[in-house]
Structure formats: structure tokens, C-alpha cells
Image (cartoon, grey):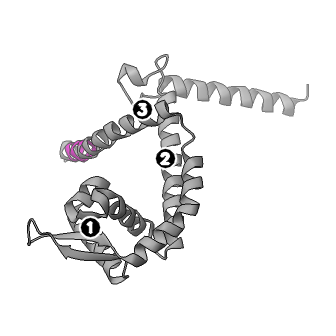
């Protein structure tokens, strides 16, 4: 075997050995046994990457739906929420809770929809200090027309059985809550690390 080939083969073997050694000595990114497979966090990392990829794609789809109505993806999502919450009439707080956004952010975005003629504000008869949001006829017409695209896209996006769909809904509700807690935890731990360095 030529010397150059020997060096290349040896180098490849060394690289593979090094990578294997690195995998063995890498610290785990999770510690809960339920998230480890044979003592490895590889399956967990693969799941996170799949979730990131799915999240990016579903956001792209939302943005495309929005652009069909000359809206941002966020404005489209808020418009859809107003359409489907409380029979097409909802308050700022209900929308904020449903979408996990702050009330201030929803107020700003709703004002854009009002300006675009897609949302109307009406006084809440139960509390005149608050307003309720309702779709304008123009918004309803546009959303009705969009269902011809939404329906087949959403069907393809979620090729699940009824059981899988129900299970996914329960899991996602649980993960939304835990992700809020994780956000607070990462801020706390980052602050603690800075304090320790100081």
C-alpha cells in the first residue's frame, strides 16, 4: 500500500476514534432517565432538532397564509384566533392567553388589523372599560376564501390518526407550560453563573 494511502487511512481511523472518544466523554445535555436511551442523549438531541425543523416549517406556512391576505404571519394568527375564539368575538386578554403573548403585544397587533379594516372593536356590555374584538365582513370573506388552501395544507401538515392527534394536543399543552418554566430557569441560571464569575 502506498505511503500516502497508509497515512490517509491512518488519519481517517484516528479521526473516527477521536470522534468516538469525544462522544463518550461529552457531557449529557439532559439528566432525566426518561430522556436517555442507553445512557445517551442522542435521541433527545434528534427530537429537539426535529421540533426546531417542524417549528420553522409551520411558521413559514403561517407566514405564507398571512401574505395571501397581505398580513404578517403574526397578524394572520391573531385574526384566525379572533375568528375562532368565543364564536368570533373575543377580548384582548383571551387572545393573549390563547396565543401565549403579552396583552400589550396583542393590543399593538390588533390595532394594525383595525387599521386594515379587518377587525372592529366593540364595547364589552359586561365591562364598558374593555373592548371585544370581532371580524369585519371583509375579514370573514377573505378567511372563507383562504380555506381552500388552508384545509389541504393543514391535512398534509398533520398526517395523524385521531389517537395520535389527541395525544399530540395533550403533549403540546404540557410542553408549552414547561417551556415557559424553562425560559425562566435559563435566565435564573445564567444570572447565577454571572454572579459566580463576578
Give the x, y percent position of residue 6.
Answer: 83, 27
Question: Badge 1: how crowded within 10 Å, few (<14), some, or many (20+)?
Answer: few
- Magenta run includes residue 136: no
Asked if the residue at tag 2 contacts the one at tag 3, i.e. Cβ–Cβ closer than 8 Å, the answer is: no
Most common secondary structure along the magenta stretch: helix
User: Vertically, is 58 above or below 110?
Assistant: above
Asked if the residue at tag 3 contacts the one at tag 1, i.e. Cβ–Cβ closer than 8 Å, the answer is: no
Residue 133 picture quarter: bottom left
Question: Badge 3: how crowded within 10 Å, few (<14), some, or many (20+)?
Answer: few
User: Vertically, is 80 above or below 161?
Assistant: below
Residue corresponding to mark 1: 105
Q: Nearer the viewer, mark 1 or mark 3?
A: 3
Left or right of 120? Residue 156 is right
Give me the residue at 52% from left, 47% from top.
54
Pick the front one: 54 or 87: 87
- Magenta run includes residue 190: yes
Residue corresponding to mark 2: 52
Give me the residue at 55% from left, 55% from top.
151
User: Vertically, is 30 above or below 188?
Assistant: above
Q: Which residues are magenta?
A: 185-194
> From where the camera sits, is residue 101 visible?
no
Q: Which mark is residue 167?
A: 3
Secondary-structure class at tag 2? helix
The earlier-in-sequence mark between 2 and 1 is 2
The earlier-in-sequence mark between 1 and 3 is 1
Give me the residue at 28% from left, 44% from top.
186
Asked if the residue at tag 1 contacts the one at tag 2, i.e. Cβ–Cβ closer than 8 Å, the answer is: no
Give the x, y percent position of residue 40.
Answer: 48, 22
Left or right of 29? Residue 52 is right
Amino acid at each position: 500500500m502506498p505511503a500516502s494511502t497508509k497515512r490517509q487511512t491512518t488519519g481517517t481511523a484516528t479521526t473516527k476514534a477521536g470522534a468516538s472518544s469525544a462522544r463518550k466523554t461529552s457531557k449529557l445535555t439532559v439528566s432525566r432517565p426518561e430522556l436517555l436511551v442507553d445512557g445517551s442523549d442522542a435521541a433527545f438531541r434528534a427530537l429537539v432538532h426535529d421540533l426546531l425543523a417542524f417549528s420553522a416549517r409551520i411558521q413559514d406556512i403561517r407566514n405564507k397564509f398571512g401574505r395571501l391576505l397581505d398580513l404578517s404571519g403574526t397578524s394572520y394568527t391573531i385574526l384566525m384566533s379572533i375568528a375562532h375564539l368565543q364564536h368570533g368575538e373575543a377580548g384582548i386578554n383571551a387572545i393573549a392567553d390563547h396565543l401565549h403573548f403579552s396583552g400589550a403585544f396583542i393590543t399593538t397587533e390588533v390595532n394594525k388589523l383595525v387599521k386594515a379594516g379587518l377587525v372592529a372593536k366593540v364595547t364589552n356590555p359586561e365591562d364598558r372599560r374593555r373592548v371585544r374584538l370581532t371580524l369585519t365582513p371583509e375579514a370573514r370573506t377573505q378567511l372563507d376564501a383562504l380555506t381552500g388552501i388552508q384545509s389541504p395544507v393543514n391535512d398534509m401538515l398533520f398526517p395523524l390518526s385521531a389517537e395520535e392527534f389527541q395525544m399530540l394536543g395533550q403533549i403540546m399543552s404540557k410542553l408549552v407550560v414547561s417551556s415557559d418554566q424553562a425560559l425562566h430557569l435559563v435566565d435564573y441560571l445564567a444570572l447565577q453563573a454571572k454572579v459566580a464569575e463576578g
